[in-house]
Amino acid sequence: MIEGLDRKKLAELTGQADFGPMVDLAAAEIALGQGEPGTARRHFNQARARAR
């Protein structure tokens, strides 16, 4: 569900340009909690790429 968020629109609504990477980090944290380290790593790498 969190992965389907429109990061651009939410960044505009919140005024936070770094909203996209924060969504990816939240998804990584959820995946870790669900015992899915591979998925968590993928989300973390996406957050790192978006933050650059």
Image: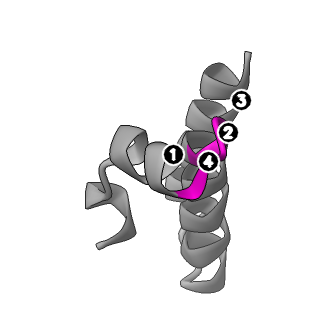
| CA separation in Å, label 3 and label 4 | 20 Å
Image spot of residue 49 (x, y percent): 63, 21
Residue 11 bears which disc, if any? Answer: 1
Tag 2 near tag 1, CB within 8 Å:
yes
Tag 1 near tag 4, CB within 8 Å:
yes
Tag 3 near tag 4, CB within 8 Å:
no
Q: How many C-alpha atoms fall within 10 Å of the one at disc 3: few (<14), some, or many (≥20)?
A: some
Residue 41 bears which disc, if any? Answer: none
Identify the residue at horizontal 38%, vertical 68% (top origin): 2
Q: Nearer the viewer, mark 1 or mark 3?
A: 1
Point out the tag, 3 or 4, that comes first from the N-terminus.
4
Residue that numbered label 3 is attached to: 48
Secondary structure type for disc 1: helix
Residue that numbered label 2 is attached to: 18
Q: How many C-alpha atoms fall within 10 Å of the one at disc 4: few (<14), some, or many (≥20)?
A: few
Residue that numbered label 4 is attached to: 15
Q: Nearer the viewer, mark 1 or mark 4?
A: 4
State the image quarter where residue 28 is shown.
bottom right
> The residue under label 2 is which amino acid type?
Asp
Image spot of residue 33 (x, y percent): 64, 84
Q: Which residues are magenta?
A: 14-19
Overall secondary structure of the magenta stretch?
loop
| CA separation in Å, label 3 and label 2 | 11 Å
> The residue under label 3 is which amino acid type?
Arg
Identify the residue at horizontal 32%, vertical 58% (top origin): 5
Image spot of residue 21 (x, y percent): 63, 42
Q: Is residue 18 above or below residue 33?
A: above
Q: Nearer the viewer, mark 3 or mark 2?
A: 2
| CA separation in Å, label 1 and label 4 | 6 Å
Q: Nearer the viewer, residue 37 or 17?
A: 17
Point out the tag, 3 or 2, that comes first from the N-terminus.
2
